[in-house]
Image (tube, coloured by chain):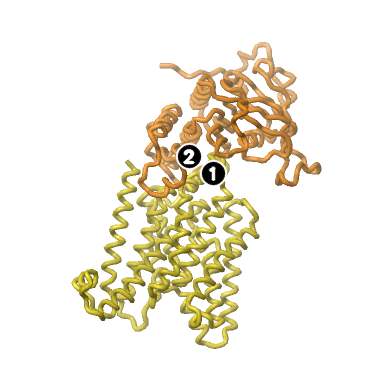
Amino acid sequence: MAMQRNFNISIILIGLLAVTSILSLLFGAAEISLRNIFDWISGQGEPMQAIILGDIRAPRITLAALVGFVLGLGGASVQGLLRNPLAEPSLLGASNAAALGAVLVIYLGLATTVSYAVPIAASLAALASVGLLALFTGGHVSSIRLILAGFAVSALAGAGIALALNLSPNVFAALEISFWLLGAVENSSWQHVYLALPGCLVGALLMLGSAKSLNALSLGDDVARSLGVGVTGLQWRISIGLALAIGSAVAATGVIGFVGLVAPHMARRLTGYSISRSLLVSGLLGAILLVAGDSLIRSLPTQTELKLGVLTAFLGVPMLLYLLRPRGSKLVQE
Amino acid sequence: MTNLHIEKLTYSFGPASRGYNKSETPIVTDINCEFVAGQLTSIMGPNGAGKTTALKLAAGLLEPSQGYIRFGDPTIDFKDASVRARRIAYLPQFQSVVWPMLVREVVALGRLPHAAGNISGMVPGFNSLRADDEEAINDAMVQANILKLQDRAIDSLSGGEQARVLLARALATQADIFLLDEPIQSLDPAGQLEVMNLLQGLAQQGKAVVISIHDMNLAAHYSDQVILMRAGKIHCFGAPQDVFTSPNIRGVFDVQILSAADRNEQLIQLDLIKD
């Protein structure tokens, strides 16, 4: 049965994520062997290696997995909600709004004094973007209107970021903002993980909890409503879920693109086009992609470490083009 | 099984909270009718007569500006969306499935009103369909004659096959009342007769079946009740032989019957070939 197959896919992907994450511990400037990892897990490792593994690599891998998961899940949810295979989590404006919140905090110099300032400002800004979205659309709207309103919110936040860069008092602040915007998990501590976790968790539950309603939406608004789905409520659940999850993720890592667009398409290759079944699989694929991408970054012998957002863009675009190739499988009913 | 009563129903564009705005021309005006359990009702009228709006109102998808809709059984609350979802199946006129889902997956969506909730849908592989759901889905596919297509992607089917899949989705809800907006518009002659026979069978099972339809021959042959609409109002309703009179047809459709006396010779009457 298809159901059983999907269960198996999820289990396999969870296993794959675990293996990727453990293998990911091997990559980096310091030489670490599998033997060292087992010693560390059993608590018999050297203190230096324990610090590298436990305090440097483990948190950044965890963060990559967490952010990748919500990006993949957010992408699948927003594609389902908008019935549009081009949609990605940033489409409704939450990413840019969160980035603006974070940038303002960096710009005002609060980032170094208050460690919670960036994630809190980013999450609040992401939620504010939903408020703005509501203001622009006002209640239930067609998905095209929601896309346009999201685009407007996103553009407004983008303009705010540009303004902050424009007015930045010195070149270092501008550089800090630019680098932060590129998206990275380097220098992440467990604190970053803890700060991102609640928003990601609540957001993910809101999206996963809407799975069946999203399914009904593939038959159109009217049929979904005739099946008892509150379409307006669904729109806001997904929008708020996205804002919470993507806001927290952006706060922790900056803007990481393309995972949220590519993961849902890969997921549907595995699960078929029933949105509810693609959600979890898309999240897991997003997590695997980011953990693998971060491993690649750490193993590349570059002078300055590559930013994860740069890598995902470079890898994500060819992946998308591959999925779009003329003889590839259909992305949507054409 | 229950009837659906529609009383003094008026609808004009704009949110219901603004009330009935007199400056706007209402799309439907003062509609009174009853969709009776065990009967096949055909709503007919020229384009723009308000058939679709009337069906959407009856399905609870639009908020009436005036008047109300209620179930014949007073213990069933029409205002409750989840109650409506189990009692009323609605099929829109133009419908496409966005994603190339499998036929079986599309039909299974009809079981959503009966599902325990969203939680079971969270975990892929967790089979949220109970045995009675599976049975309803299979029955619907058998009735709509699409069992053979169940593992095909819906976008690989012909227009007529897709229409049947969407009809099967409506059947799978096992509602009491079926509101179907032009369910035979994209079907070939054999398909039209098959679906009309199916709908007649549904009515005979005690369901209230309501369709909008343009083909007077089929409506006359299959309906228990015909409602003629023009310019948002009900022109007349009743048994087909009472409704399809020369003055009514001329008044509603602006066409005339050439020879009402021997119309059996004028019309091509079709029936399915039984083998």
- Up the image or down, A43 lies above or below B106; here it is below
Q: Colour of chain A?
A: yellow
Percent x, y of residue A107 = 55, 81
Split into 4 quadrants, where in the image is the N terminus of chain B?
top right
Tell me the crowding category of disc 1: few under 14, some 14 to 19, or many 20 or more residues within 10 angstroms, Cα based.
many
Please determine whether, in this image, residue B272 is positioned above or below residue B153: above
**In the picture shown, does residue A226 fall above or below A113?**
above
- State whether discs 2 and 1 lie on one chain: no
Task: Tally the numbered discs.
Answer: 2
Which residue is the site of mark 1? A229
Q: Can residue B253 be spotted in the picture?
A: no
The amino acid at mark 2 is Leu
Looking at the picture, tell me which residue is in the foreground, A262 or B66.
B66
Question: Which residue type does callout 1 highlight?
Answer: Val
- Percent from the top left, x then y, of residue B116? 45, 41
Element assignment for label 1:
loop
In the image, which disc is placed on residue B112? Answer: 2
Neighbourhood count class around disc 2 (C-alpha, 10 Å): few under 14, some 14–19, many 20 upward: many
In which quadrant of the rendered image does the C terminus of chain B lie?
top left
Residue A16 shown left or right of residue B187 in the figure: left
Q: Is residue B168 left or right of residue B32?
A: left
Please give left or right for residue B194 compared with residue A303 in the image: right
Q: Colour of chain B?
A: orange
Pointer 2 chain = B
Nearer to us in this view, A106 or B148: A106
Side (left or right) of A195 relative to B240: left
Disc number at residue A200? none
